[in-house]
Each structure stands twice: as structure tokens, then as C-alpha cells.
Image: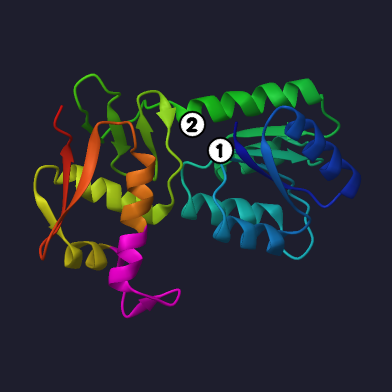
Amino acid sequence: MSSLLIIEDDDLLRDGLCTQLAQEGHQVATAADGEQAQHLLESERFDGVILDLSLPKRDGMDILQWSRKRSPALPILILTARDSVDDRVQGLKAGADDYMTKPFNMQELQARLASLLRRARLPAFTGSLEIGATAHPVLRVDAQLPRAWLGDHAMELTQREWSLLSLLVRHAGQVVSRDDVVSLWQIDGTEGGLSASNALEVYIHRLRRKLQGSGLNIRNVRGLGYLFETKSP
């Protein structure tokens, strides 16, 4: 299913939401305050967020605006006790995809969340990059947002995996040099203890695994770089 983050300072409500959504098959992480939420959003990838606005340490509206700048396509559902029309308008204008007030109906929340997640997975965007091998699903890569699909299935990609895949698809059939990728990522020196070259190899390996069965291949061209191609039948 989906990876979700629940940002809620009420322990009982947070635990209840976590239990209900986990029973639906979702992987659920939780945060009890704004600072913890920001840390999780920076360090992990989520398919959707349920966000309370009245949070300790950092207000939910600040988290919403920060998240929207960082991840424009991330589905965010506000769940809050702030029930005035002005609050709703402010939340939606700030970038929320939906707005629900407490108390709420759990079935309605699940239905709204499912709708947000379903729309986020649809490859109905402009500026997509496409490539496919005969008798295999088409690979579609969003040219602007960190999203990609193999056929109708959304791929799980980090920001760097998406930027690397976009570059390779854009130059399919041509050699992309290591320097081109390092420049794209603006890596200087080391990343997490790895040299830029070794870090690139790690991401290439990850993409190869995620493209297994697609009829597509990332081939090393010795001394030059990488070539994105369809495999020979």
C-alpha cells in the first residue's frame, strides 16, 4: 500500500489513526510535534501526510508551507480542530490537498485519503518522459516532479534516483558521463562517507534493481559513463 506520516500531538488520536491505517495495509510513521515531523520528512519518503495544525515546537501551518516548497506533489490532508471558514481557506491556499475538522468520521477520512493517494499515482501530468521496450510496460518519468511509473505502477524513487533516471531517459541511446551526473547533483568531494563516483554507483545499482523486468537497461560504457537502452530481445 502506501507509506504515511501522521503528525498529531494527541497521543490517543495519533495511536488510533496509526492502528486503523495500518490495518488497511499502510506503513505508518508518526510525529508528535512539528520538529519531529520535519526531521522525518527530511529523512524518509512518504506517499501521504495527515497533518494537525496545532502542534508543539513548530506550528502545523509552518510544516505545511515548508513541505509544499520541498515536495510540491506530496498529498497532505489537514486534520484539525480549527473549523472556521477562514481556517479552511488559509489551509487550502497554503497547499493542503484536503481539509477535515475534528471530530471526524474514520470511514470518511480513509475515503478522502485513498482519493488523494490514488490521484497522486495517476500518470496524468504534462512534460513526461517516456521510453519502453517491446512487450513491456512503458516507463514514464515526470519531467518536473519526483515521480515515475512503470505501466500503471508508481515507482518508489528518492529525489536523486528520480533526477538520475530523468537524465538517463532524456538522453536514452546516448552516453551520459559521470561528470554530467555529479554536476547535476552538485556533489563536491564526498557524500555520506562515499566518494562522488562510489555514490553514483550506488544509485545506478538501485535503479537497475527497480527496472528489473522492464526490458530497460543501464549499461556501463567503460571510461565514458552510462548508456540507457532497451535490452535486445
Disc sitting over residue 198 in the figure: none
Q: Nearer the viewer, residue 101 or 85?
A: 101
Secondary structure, mark 1, is loop
**Please, what is the three-letter code of the amino acid marked with disc 1?**
Pro
Q: Position of residue 129 (x, y in %)?
A: 23, 36
Quadrant in which residue 27 is drawn: top right
Which residue of the protein is positioned furthest toward the bottom in this rendering?
Answer: 189
Please give the name of the residue rendered at 56% of the width and 40% of the height, measured from the top-left corner. Answer: 47
Marks 2/1: CA distance? Answer: 7 Å
How crowded pointer 1 is (Cα within 10 Å; few <14, some 14-19, many 20+) is rated as many
* Pointer 2 with pointer 1, Cβ within 8 A: yes
Q: Which residue is mark 1?
A: 75
> Which segment did they paint magenta?
185-202
Please give the name of the residue rendered at 82% of the width and 44% of the height, measured from the top-left corner. Answer: 14
Please give the name of the residue rendered at 46% of the width and 29% of the height, measured from the top-left corner. Answer: 121
Q: Position of residue 185 (x, y in %)?
A: 31, 64
- The correct choice, above or below, for 143 with respect to 204 in the image is above
Quarter of the figure that contains the N terminus? top right
**Please, what is the three-letter code of the amino acid marked with disc 2?**
Ala
How crowded pointer 2 is (Cα within 10 Å; few <14, some 14-19, many 20+) is rated as some
Secondary structure, mark 2, is helix
Q: Which residue is mark 2?
A: 120
Query: On the picture, is 190 further left or further right than 40?
Result: left
Give the number of callouts: 2
Sequence order check: which comes first, mark 2 or mark 1?
Answer: 1
